[in-house]
């Protein structure tokens, strides 16, 4: 089937069965015209459990496949969601390209979780492979589709901008106590540290907020990037030891640390040459209720603000109430007692539900999504500029730097 034809129901194949795959599956419950038809990941027990969960929640029937090739060739999936670790993304896309260009299966689209790749060269290869295979493509950046972001941007650009002018500053911050899986802490696998892992969110949601509603993202031209990285918490002996124990020795921050704090300033110009700016910070060294996302959009006569922890629902539990450690109130939850905010619909508030609804409709009807691999490539280019700025201690001017094969210091194999 051509990617431009309309199908009544999009049959999705999930590649990966970890934490983020679970988030996507949960959000799919709120998406029409879609079925989770297949799951592939290298671990049989994990893929079978996720496929069973999809079927039990009414999203199936879902089948667990023992290879990606078998899932594509089955003819039961129209689109693939790549949800695997960063160091597997390019090889996964190469396998998709190989099978799709051989004419096997009915694949029409592919979506990939953030970041698209670890380097500019890898991201460009992801884009090339998708387009060469004739596949529609989408970059899964959930914060762009957050209900607060979508509603806030619509109000600002409709009510405030016409009377006073475009917004000129977007601030974005994301913080929590550290990732779930060991590979996130391994620079060569993840592609970096917290800058790679979380600044991709902050950069793209800020870029989106600053872009006029009907304009392409390319209407903003990045001019310069200035970045700082630091090790604030996890290289301290106590916490390095704790991290090693938690990951059963897979992560050793006494020998190979990655940054747990990052700061970014990105200067851009709009189509009329006016300067706009992005300020962003990300951290794995935040100890609070849980994941905290803070967003601001400022213009001549207005401001928009959002904080994920300023919830309407809060729960208090006294010290007399015991309980096992968990994350049932908020992602990256840090306590089970006291006054705690509750994010009552994480999949919706964080943007996963509307994100998947958007991509399903675009892939089902053959339309270009709001976020594509082209956007994923540009985000990686900005991240690499920030890493080079942090490494060299200077502002990087985007038009003057060759970032194609640049690898951040913490991701260079054998450097540490």
Image (cartoon, helix red, strand yellow):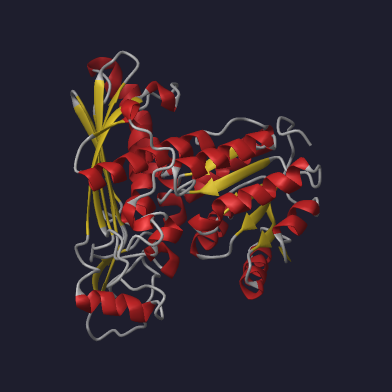
Residue 1 placement, left or right of 360: right
Say which residue appears at 26% left-offset and 54% top-offset. 310
Residue 101 placement, left or right of 411: right
Viewport quadrant of the C terminus? bottom left
Residue 343 in picture, x, y percent from top left: 36, 59
Residue 159 placement, left or right of 114: left
Say which residue appears at 53% left-offset and 54% top-offset. 27
Tally the marks.
0
Residue 378 in picture, x, y percent from top left: 43, 35
Residue 140 in picture, x, y percent from top left: 50, 45
Residue lying furthest top in this view? Answer: 272
Q: Is residue 232 visible?
A: yes
Say which residue appears at 55% left-offset and 58% top-offset. 84
Residue 247 in picture, x, y percent from top left: 40, 76
Q: Nearer the viewer, residue 6 or 397?
A: 397
Q: Nearer the viewer, residue 402 or 99?
A: 402
Quadrant hosting residue 83: bottom right
Viewport quadrant of the N terminus? top right
Residue 140 placement, left or right of 325: right
């Amino acid at each position: 089937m051509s990617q431009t034809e309309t199908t009544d129901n999009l049959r999705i194949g999930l590649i990966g069965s970890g934490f983020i795959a679970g988030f996507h599956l949960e959000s799919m419950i709120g998406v029409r015209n879609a079925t989770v038809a297949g799951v592939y990941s290298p671990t049989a027990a994990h893929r079978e459990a996720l496929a069973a969960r999809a079927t039990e929640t009414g999203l199936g029937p879902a089948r667990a496949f023992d290879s990606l090739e078998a899932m594509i060739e089955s003819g039961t999936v129209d689109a693939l969601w790549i949800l695997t670790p960063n160091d597997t993304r390019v090889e996964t896309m190469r396998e998709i390209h190989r099978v799709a260009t051989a004419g096997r299966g009915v694949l029409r689209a592919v979506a990939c979780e953030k970041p698209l790749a670890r380097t500019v060269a890898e991201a460009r290869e992801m884009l090339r492979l998708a387009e060469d295979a004739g596949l529609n493509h989408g970059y899964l950046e959930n914060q762009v589709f957050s209900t607060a972001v979508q509603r806030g941007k619509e109000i600002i650009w409709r009510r405030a901008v016409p009377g006073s002018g475009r917004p000129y500053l977007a601030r974005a911050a994301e913080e929590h106590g550290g990732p779930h899986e060991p590979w996130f802490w391994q620079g060569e696998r993840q592609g970096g540290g917290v800058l790679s892992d979380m600044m991709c969110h902050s950069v793209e949601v800020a870029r989106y907020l600053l872009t006029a509603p009907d304009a392409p993202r390319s209407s903003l031209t990045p001019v310069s990037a200035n970045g700082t990285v630091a090790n604030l918490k996890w290289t301290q002996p106590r916490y390095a030891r704790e991290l090693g124990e938690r990951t059963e020795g897979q992560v050793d921050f006494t020998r190979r640390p990655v940054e747990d704090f990052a700061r970014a300033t990105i200067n851009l110009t709009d189509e009329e040459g006016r300067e706009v700016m992005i300020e962003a910070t990300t951290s794995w060294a935040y100890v609070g209720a849980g994941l905290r996302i803070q967003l601001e959009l400022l213009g001549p006569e207005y401001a928009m603000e959002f904080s994920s922890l300023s919830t309407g629902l809060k729960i208090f539990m006294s010290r007399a109430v015991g309980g096992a450690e968990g994350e049932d109130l908020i992602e990256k939850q840090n306590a089970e007692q006291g006054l705690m905010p509750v994010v009552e619909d994480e999949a919706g508030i964080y943007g996963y539900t509307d994100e998947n609804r958007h991509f399903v409709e675009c892939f089902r009807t053959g339309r270009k999504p709001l976020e594509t691999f082209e956007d994923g490539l540009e985000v990686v280019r900005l991240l690499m500029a920030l890493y080079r700025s942090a490494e060299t201690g200077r502002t990087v001017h985007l038009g003057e730097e060759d970032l194609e094969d640049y690898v951040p210091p913490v991701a260079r194999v054998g450097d540490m």
